[in-house]
Image (tube, rainbow, N blue to C red):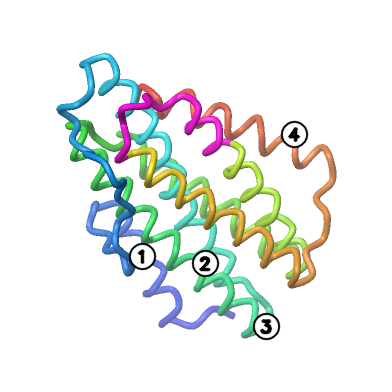
Amino acid sequence: MLSSDALFASADLALRTLSGSAHAARPMPRPAGPADAEALTPEQQRLSGALMRVNHVGEVCAQALYAAQALTARTPELRAQMQAAGREETDHLAWTERRLAELGDRPSLLNPLWYAGAFAIGLVAGRAGDRISLGFVVETERQVEAHLASHLQRLPEADLGSRAVVAQMKDDEARHADAALQAGAAAMPAPARWLMRAAARVMTATAHVI
């Protein structure tokens, strides 16, 4: 049975996530060189904005997933692990929000839908048991890590600001996956992995433009 405090905290997180008021605990990664959007051509700026919007959607979903999995964790240790990872994802959320603003672009208009869907998926994963919930974290973070690696290849070379943010996010996601694996994650069955990849492709394609 979930406590009223836990439910209120979850609702508060949803509101903060969707209102664009996330605050990072860590400084935003910055490159050694200039990070101005003015250094980019209009085409490069549009591409960077679209890619960072997709990354921002991923962080909206991460907030929802970790919140739901923390709510349904069966041990205090796993709950604390999910909450700690969620706090680092809040850094990512704040960084991508800020970078979108610097690029003169906007978040996805469908963020409430992304959050609700991810929260529901997180509840299902959490209810399935701690080892499965951890396995879901491993698979999700591995897919996100690969996705961010592809963005590092696609982002304009001149967009040093976005590249610095994405590189740090990629390192953090890899660490989250490793921690979940070490905590006893169960391997996800192949059909579940395929379904997760298909859902991620739909989200990515949609968020790129909407």
Tell me the amino acid under the disc marked 4: Trp
Q: How far separated are the C-alphas under marks 4 and 3?
A: 29 Å
Q: Which mark is residue 85?
A: 2
Q: Which quadrant of the view contains residue 14?
A: bottom left
Mark closer to the chain start, 2 or 1: 1
Q: Which quadrant of the view contains residue 125?
A: bottom right
Q: How far separated are the C-alphas under marks 3 and 2?
A: 16 Å
In this view, the residue in front, 143 or 114, is 143
Q: Which residue is mark 4?
A: 194
Tell me the amino acid under the disc marked 2: Ala
Kind of element beneath mark 1: helix
Q: Which residue is mark 1?
A: 13
Q: Which residue is mark 3?
A: 75
Mark closer to the chain start, 4 or 3: 3
In this view, the residue in front, 86 or 14, is 86
Report crowding for label 4: few under 14, some 14 to 19, many 20 or more residues within 10 A (C-alpha).
few
Q: Which residues are magenta?
A: 147-161
Q: How far separated are the C-alphas under marks 2 and 1?
A: 14 Å
Q: How far separated are the C-alphas under marks 4 and 1?
A: 29 Å
